[in-house]
Amino acid sequence: MHADQELLDAIRARVGAGRLPSDGEVQIFGGKGDGAVCACCDLPITRTQIQYDIELRSVDGTMTVMSMHLDCFEAWQRISQRK
């Protein structure tokens, strides 16, 4: 998955709809993919790909855990920082 315009638009839409958070304290863990579904693109993260597991605590204290491809994480991070 590459951070192309379609991906960026999809992530913006998910942030706008509240499906992806746009702020809060983030802890990031990385490793090989384990088949989890990416929170940004809904595709599985295979063992040959890098998987980021993100633990995000929002300003209201809610904890969200998400898995993302490396490219998807970078795109989400760029979009989230613009808010």
Image: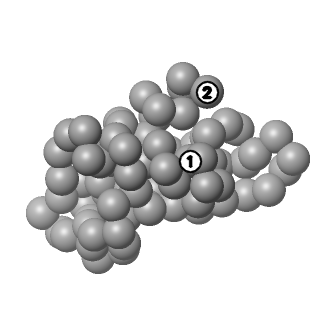
Tell me which corner region of the image, top left, top right, bottom left or bottom right, holds residue 45: bottom left
Question: Distance of mark 1 from mark 2, alpha carbons?
Answer: 10 Å
Residue type at tag 2 = Lys
Q: Residue at x 17, y 45 (%)?
A: 2
Mark 2 lies on residue:
83
**Residue sitting farthest toward the left:** 48
Please tell me in which quadrant of the rendered image residue 35 appears: bottom left
Which residue does the numbered mark 1 point to in the structure image?
15
Question: Toward the viewer: 26 or 82?
Answer: 82
Label 1: which secondary element = helix
The residue closer to the viewer here, 17 or 63, is 17
Q: Is residue 54 visible?
A: no
Left or right placement of residue 43 versus residue 36 in this view = left
Residue at image location 43% in from the left, 28% down from the top: 78
Are dots 1 and 2 in contact, CB under 8 Å? yes
Q: Total label count?
A: 2
